[in-house]
Amino acid sequence: MHLTLKKEAIRPPGVNSLRQQARFDVFVEEYNIERPHEALAMKCPAEVYIPSNRPYRGLPELSYPFHDTDIVVTDCGRICMHRKKINLSLVFAGQTVGIKEVDDGIWLVSFMHHDLGYIDLEQRTLQPIDTPFG
């Protein structure tokens, strides 16, 4: 699919973002509605798609009772603590993380039930834990 997308929608690229988006829209329409797929017994994805009957309600309200404090990650992926800005990740923008001091100036950062890494306040860095999500 990615090779087909590249060939049909981005090579050559559109002259501006609006034209490029129009090329993507045409590709998506053709790929999902007009073009049959072997993996779907030669049906189009639109023919077999069934929306979920379970509504998505987003994440529950997050709290970290075993941490020192909860912090909301900024839209640019940072947390601010003790007047210092530490880059976490845009992935967590708008989400609440828990932080807990584990040593002098060293803080554990957690998201839901996963420990992400340690913040060194003096260096303003996050040292990630290897594969925090297993």
Image: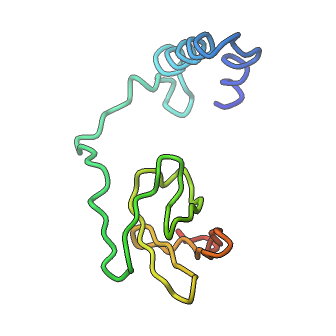
Q: Is residue 76 left or right of residue 122?
A: left
Q: Nearer the viewer, residue 14 or 105?
A: 105
Residue 86, image x, y percentages: 58, 63
Q: Relative to 58, does residue 125 appear above or below in the rendering?
A: below
Residue 45, image x, y percentages: 45, 26
Residue at x-position 30% and y-position 79%: 65
Q: Nearer the viewer, residue 115 or 104?
A: 104
Placement of the N terminus among the 4 image quadrants: top right
Residue at x-position 28% and y-position 45%: 56
- Residue, far front: 83
The colour mode here is rainbow
Q: Relative to 1, does residue 123 appear above or below in the rendering?
A: below
Q: Nearer the viewer, residue 53 or 72?
A: 72
Q: Nearer the viewer, residue 27 or 45?
A: 27
Quadrant hosting residue 122 = bottom right
Residue at x-position 52% and y-position 78%: 108
Residue at x-position 55% and y-position 26%: 37
